[in-house]
Image: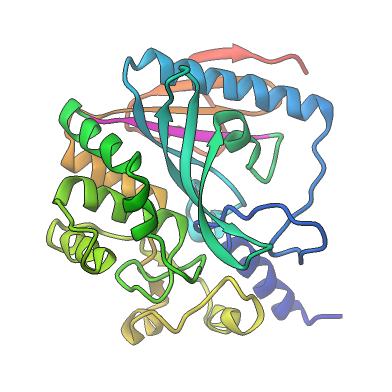
Amino acid sequence: MLPRRATAVLRVTLAAIALGASASASAGMPVFCERGKEVSAAEQDRVLRFAGTVKRELEASGGSVALIARAGLDLSRFDLLYSHAGVALKEADSAWTVRQLYYACDESRPRIFDQGVAGFALGADAPGRGHVSLVFLDRDEAAQLEQAARDKPLALALLAGRYSANAYAFGTRYQNCNQWVAELLASAWGGIDRREKPREQAQDWLREQGYSAGPVKLKSRWLMFAGQFVPLVHLDDHPVDDLYALSLRVSVPASIEDFAHRRSPKARRVELCHDTRHIVVHRGWEPIGAECAPMPGDEVIPLDS
């Protein structure tokens, strides 16, 4: 039996995997790679209804691209709600898909994956509650992002060979899903040449533009040992000063949204959440919070218990 402190560290470390993790299902993989949690028919129905509301908002935007993020594992220990970001794209058949980086467990490497909105919503760890955030950019910025996101050679050129859930945002040794999105934004808006070290160029441009990753605050120095026990968490790419300060510069959805809002001041944000009672649709940049409690003016869609 693990000591109490070691057990706490393991729990937090597993939660840290959600900082950009979107692992594929593969039978027999360890718990850190596949949670394997069963979803009841009632839970699945509720999440599918939630996904339908997300698709409604995407369609109502009148556009064909949006930044999208969801809440995954419980990251409240890090004062974070959203964990995983991607780019939502409207296809020729009017369906919406999410282009994203995910960790392919069976291959032990990151991949670019297109997923339907329903599957994206079902990726949340707790089907009894879910949060999705949508950011609709100004016309010019949206067009540039859509062009970059649909450029498959560019998407692959920005893909690192090694994955780390807590990858340093300005390093190229590893990458997580949110870091890939940030570097895609840099490629879209910064005119990055994918033929010559595109990730380095993207990160240099992000620095120049004042992109602020995280910071993810660690509550205890015990987490410094995480990389020794969980293969998807590493610390060897982070600056020593950040490690001593227990403050890691990791790309998270909040960082990406803040940067996009500064770059695209007229961008609109729609946040949707659900619990077992209702779906809430909140329009605006003020966060709705983890409890999914509606604010004045929010749309509330009742759910059958």
User: Is residue 201 visible in the rendered structure shown here?
Assistant: yes
Q: Magenta part of the protein: which range? A: 129-137
Query: What residue do we see at 69% from left, 42% from top?
Result: 126
Query: Measured from the top left, where is residue 206 in percent x and y?
Result: 20, 59
Query: Measured from the top left, where is residue 197 in percent x and y?
Result: 24, 69
Q: Is residue 145 left or right of residue 152?
A: left
Query: What residue do we see at 43% from left, 72% from top?
Result: 174
Query: Measured from the top left, where is residue 243 in percent x and y?
Result: 40, 82
Query: What residue do we see at 69% from left, 62% from top?
Result: 106
Q: Is residue 161 above or below residue 300?
A: below
Q: Nearer the viewer, residue 242 or 17?
A: 17
Prevailing secondary structure of the magenta residues: strand
Total numbered badges shown on the rendered structure: 0
- The quadrant the C terminus occupies is top right
Query: What residue do we see at 75% from left, 63% from top?
Result: 31
What coloring was used for the rendering? rainbow
Q: Is residue 123 above or below residue 279?
A: below
